[in-house]
Every structure is written in structure tokens, then in C-alpha cells.
Image (spheres, helix red, strand yellow):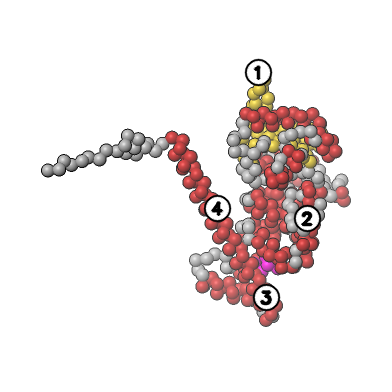
Amino acid sequence: MTKRKTFKFPKHTVIKNAVIAGSDYEQFLSALKKRIQTARLSAARAVNRDLILLYWDIGHAIVKKQELLNWGDSVVEMAAKDLQREFPAMTGFSPRNLRDMKRFYLTYADEAIWRQAVAKLDKGAKDETIRLQSAAKMNEEQILGFLRQLVAEIPWGHNLLILNKLTEPAGRLYYLRAVARFGWSRNVLLNQIKAGAYERAALEKKTHNFPLALPEYLAEQAEEALKSSYNLEFLGIRREIRERQLEDRLLARLREFILELGYGFCFVGRQHRLALGQKEYFIDLLFYHRFIKALVAFELKVGPFEPECAGKMDFYLNLLNEKERAPDDRPSIGIILCAEKDNLEVEFALKSKTNPIGVAEYHLHSKLPPELKGKLPTARQLLDVVRPILPTGKQG
């Protein structure tokens, strides 16, 4: 009888399952989660894009049929009723929404108006938040195609907000492009419109050294995230205060401050400690920007910008990059927030700095048009008028 041979595994072969744990599995799981999140976001964007393009086409169809067959507004009511009957599971086919689709299409259908709007944003765009292809290089089909694709990048609620709150084409274009670029929520968009982000971007020059300190693609992202000025009227400050008091107010109203900064800023901490040898240094406010993937340090100054502010910020950024910047983070960015600045002085102060630094003003009160200055009542005068009708205990 032949002796049965037994098979032996080579000594280097592992026949037991390895323990699934530790950093390798954490990295594996993290990569899967990111891939799933990316796929979900991509799918949601595709669904939104198709929906907005559908609304554009419905608006276009209504307009063309009314022009061709001289149909009245009653066609909207009839179409809404029939579409709701045919597609009961779908929302969005109410008479009001169909009228909005018609208005939506008509708003962007005039090629000449939008050519001017594109040209307005494109002109002198070095310091403009939204840079676009030159309008002179676009024909009518390209202009309308550009607009059609742009509005499809943002949700319907955002589109309606822009339609309802703005009338100037260049302003609408500014916010459309900003939402598509930064992914602003509806609340952030509303706050930016109320704060006059477009008007400020058009009137005020941004001051920074980003093109000198960063690669071109990153300099553009940083420039877009920086505003020329910040509206801090929500703090309710009516008298002179110290820098620490300004910091306290900003932290007490952190939600409003982040809305004013724009989408993407995540708060890290206040008076952020940096150690070097036996000394300690403190950054007023530290944020992380999700899209730029960089730490952003804010220094507050209740007075005017001084050249030494740039040197101090440059030093802080060196420490951040050396001690706290993650391996896959971009270079840290500094923003000096001051009461006023001289653009020429800022330019010379930043010339020799190797780190990206921006300087912006903050405003505690909304700027009135010149024709209204001195013609509106003060808060005290308003209180004197309404005091007699206020309930007892609420008379200030």
C-alpha cells in the first residue's frame, strides 16, 4: 500500500488570516469613505444639473409656444395641472414654479445683456473675485451655452434667490459663479448678497502678495477666498474698542462671522498658541479652509495697517508651516484685518514677504450713498420717537 504524502506549506506562507486592525485598516476604510462620499456628491450634482436644465427647457418651451401661437398665461395653469396629473410623484410642477421657469429662461435669454455682463466682470479682472473668458471671444451660442451650464451648477433654490434679490446682470453673474465655485449654502449666499459682496468687489481693490508667494493655481484660489473688506456691522459696535474686545465680539457671533468670511472656513481656535524655544506667540484667530486645504491665520487690528504687521504675520506663518501644517496641506495663509489701509503702503510692506498674506479692512457700519448722509435719523432719534409707544421696561 502506497504511503499517503502530506503536503507541507513553505515556511514563509501564512495560512491564518491576519488581524484586521491598526493604521492600515483605518487608512483603507478612510479611502473607501472618501470614494463613496465623492460618488454620492457627484451623483447629486448630476441629478441637480439635469433638473435645472429641465426647468430651463420647460421655460424655453413655454416662451416659444406663447410667441408662436399667441397663447396667453392660462397655458401655464393648464400645463401645471396636466403635468401634476401625469407625474404625481414629482414636485416642482406647480403653476408658480412653471412661471418661475419661464422667468428663469427669459432672464438669461438676452444674449446682448449677458455679453455686457460678462465683459463687465472680465474687465480689469486682476483683483476681481470672478474671472471669466473674454466676452469678445464668445458668439451668441457660446454666451447662452455658458449661462445654461453655469445656472445648472447650482440648486434651484439658489437660482431663485439670485433672480429675486438681484436685478443687475453682472451682479447675478458674480453670485452664480461664486456659488458654483465655492459651494455656498443658500444662507451663505443670502448673507453675501445682503452684505453687498459684489458691490464691494467691484469698488474696492484687494491687497495681497498671493501671486508672489503661491503657485498660480493656488494664488487664484486664495485671491477668491479673500475679500477686499469685511462687513462686521452685525457686531453692533458703536464706540471705540480694543483688539481683544473685537476678538471677543467676533467669537460671540462666530456664526455670523463665518457667514461673512464665506463658505469653506472652519474655526480652529482663538489665541492659538505657538511655541519657539522658551517663548510663546499667539494668533488671534485660526481657521482651516476646506477647499484651499490650508490654515488661515487672522490678526485683528483696530487701528490702521502698519508695515510691521506684515512682518509679524510672516513670522507666525513660518511657525505654522514648520510646526502645525500637515504633510498634504497647502502653505498657510495670513489675513490682517484692520480698520483702514493704504494700498501703496500694503504693497511695499508685502513685497519682500515669502508667505501669502492679505490685508483687508473691516466695516462696522454700512456705507450710505453720499446723497443720504446726514439725512437719516440716528438710533437715538428713532428711540426718542418710538419711546412713548414702547411697553414699560423696554424703553432702553
Residue type, mark 4 in image: Leu
Is residue 104 visible in this depiction of the protein?
yes
Kindly identify which residue carries mark 1: 278
Discs 1/3, front = 1
Along the polypeptide, which appears first: circle 2 or circle 1? Answer: 2
Q: How far apart are the two marked residues, 1 and 4, measured between alpha carbons?
A: 47 Å
Discs 2/3, front = 2
Along the polypeptide, which appears first: circle 2 or circle 3? Answer: 3
Q: Main secondary structure of the magenta part?
A: helix
Q: How far apart are the two marked residues, 3 and 4, measured between alpha carbons?
A: 34 Å
Kindly identify which residue carries mark 2: 122
- Looking at the picture, tell me which residue is in the foreground, 162 or 395: 162
Along the polypeptide, which appears first: circle 4 or circle 2? Answer: 4
**Residue 233, how many percent across, how many down?**
74, 42
Q: Classify mark 3: helix, strand or loop.
A: helix
Q: How far apart are the two marked residues, 2 and 3, measured between alpha carbons?
A: 31 Å
Circles 3 and 4: CB atoms closer than 8 Å: no
Tag of residue 125: none
- The quadrant of the rendering that contains the C terminus is top right
Instruction: Estimate how packed mark 3 is, as few (under 14), some (14 to 19) or many (20 or more) residues with alpha carbons within 10 Å.
Output: few
**Residue 84, how many percent across, how many down?**
54, 70
The magenta stretch spans residue 246:
no
Residue type, mark 3 in image: Lys
Along the polypeptide, which appears first: circle 1 or circle 4? Answer: 4
Residue 275: image quadrant is top right
- Looking at the picture, tell me which residue is in the foreground, 178 or 391: 178
Instruction: Estimate how packed mark 2 is, as few (under 14), some (14 to 19) or many (20 or more) residues with alpha carbons within 10 Å.
Output: some
Q: Which segment did they paint magenta?
A: 101-107
Circles 1 and 4: CB atoms closer than 8 Å: no
Is residue 117 visible in this depiction of the protein?
no
Tag of residue 64: 3
